[in-house]
Structures are given as structure tokens and as C-alpha cells.
Amino acid sequence: LVYNDVGVFMLPTVICSLLAAAVRSGARAPTCYYAHTKYRFETMDMDFFAALEAAGLSCEEVRKPGAPSPPPSPVPYAELF
């Protein structure tokens, strides 16, 4: 879903629209779960998270209770240098 610039900027808009429609139809607190592998495409994640915030959405990293912390995210563009 977030493999190019269109997905980066449009997916948050689509999610926001779907959640707003749920509220209009009577849902009390709609929630969207989206599984995402971070840092697969350098800076797309930073742009995606910024687009979520710009759409008025918030995100939270979750994982199974007791699961070890993932390794630190790589520095953007680290593979280029």
C-alpha cells in the first residue's frame, strides 16, 4: 500500500475518509489497524507518518506483549553511503 508517493500521501486521506464515514453512520470510536514494515523505502515512512498527522490521525507502534524490541531503525539513506 505504501510503495510509492501516491500511497504515502493518499492512504492517510482514504483512512481518514473511512473513519469519518464510520462516525457519520454512528460508530462511537472507529479504529483502523494498519500493519506496516518500517524503513523499507528510506524516507517514505517519515513522509507517511507526516501525512497521517496532517490528516488529523495518530499512530502508535504496537507489538505482542513481551516481544523483544525491534532493532533500531537505520539512518535514512544509510545504504547509499
Image (cartoon, rainbow, N blue to C red):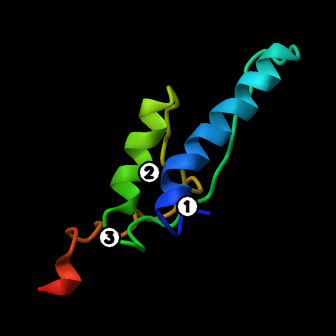
At horizontal 28% and vertical 66% (from top left) the residue drawn is 72
Q: Position of residue 64 (x, y in %)?
A: 59, 56
Q: Position of residue 60 (x, y in %)?
A: 49, 41
At horizontal 81% and vertical 24% (from top left) the residue drawn is 22
Q: In this image, 4 relative to 69: left or right? A: right
Give amino acid for label 3. Glu
Give amino acid for label 1. His
Under tag 1, what secondary structure? loop
At horizontal 31% and vertical 63% (from top left) the residue drawn is 43
Q: Is residue 70 above or below residue 29?
A: below
Quadrant containing the C terminus is bottom left
Q: In this image, 9 relative to 50: left or right? A: right
Q: Is residue 79 above or below residue 16?
A: below
Q: Are marks 1 and 2 in contact (CB under 8 Å)?
A: yes
Marked residue nearer the N-terminal end (3 or 2)? 3
Residue 48: assigned label: 2
Find residue 51 and report its image quarter: top left
At horizontal 18% and vertical 85% (from top left) the residue drawn is 80
Name the residue that disc number 3 marks.
42
Quadrant containing the N terminus is bottom right
Marked residue nearer the N-terminal end (1 or 2)? 1
Name the residue that disc number 1 marks.
36
Answer few, some or many: residues within 10 Å of disc 2's Cα (few below 14, many 20 plus, some between 14 and 19).
some
Q: CA distance from mark 1 to mark 2?
A: 11 Å
